[in-house]
Amino acid sequence: MSIHSAVATVGLKAPLGLIQVPTVKPTGEQVRVKVEWTASTPLDLHQNDGGLLVKHPQILGDGTAGTVVEVGSDVKRLKVGDKVFGFTWRSQAEKAHQEYCTAEEWLFAKVCGPLIQQGGSTGNDDVVAGRLHPARSSNAAKQFCHCLPHIDQGSGHRDAMAKA
């Protein structure tokens, strides 16, 4: 199995560490994404400084933007080479602060139109399963608003909304 680097909290209030973790091969409805953009969130701070929901070492991050590099056998919507952004948080393999993350296809949306991955990675806490929740960043909200028809069309959801 191959490995890659990840940023992790290694101890309570300790400096972050760079650790080596397995590169997980996608199965079923999972995709592997080369993480190109991510952003830190308040949860990262609470996990590192307060130990909130942490078992050390724990990879940080939940806002992922990058390129699909491998897909599982049951993936239907995404393909290798697609630019995506997503909210990935449930397991170490899904966390964003690493070179590659492997997660279920439904956790990602394709980058559309003028939406740039940098904006996608900073607003992901507001995008879950193709649904856009009120964005806290006006820049992210503007970009997401432009893409709402594409997000709805691609995900099947009809309840996306944003505010700037």
Image: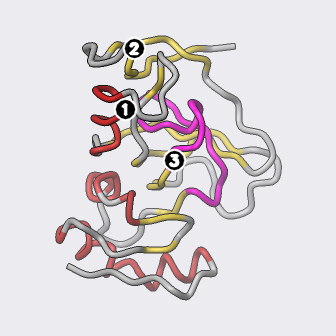
Which residue bears the numbered disc 3? 88
Viewer-proximal residue among 85 and 160: 160
Mark 1: few/some/many CA within 10 Å (<14, 14-19, 20+): many
Q: Point out which mark residue 47 bears.
A: 1
Provide residue 62's location: percent of width, then percent of height.
43, 45
Circle 2: element type? loop
Q: Earlier in the sequence, mark 2 or mark 1?
A: 2
Specify whether residue 8 is painted magenta. no
**Which residue type carries mark 1?**
Gln
- In the displayed structure, 135 sits above or below 101; it is below
Q: Residue at x 63, y 58 (%)?
A: 78
Circle 3: element type? loop
Q: Residue at x 29, y 45 (%)?
A: 41
Provide residue 160's location: percent of width, then percent of height.
46, 82
Viewer-proximal residue among 77 and 136: 136
- In the displayed structure, 8 sits above or below 109; it is above
**Which residue type carries mark 2?**
Val
Q: Residue at x 56, y 30 (%)?
A: 92
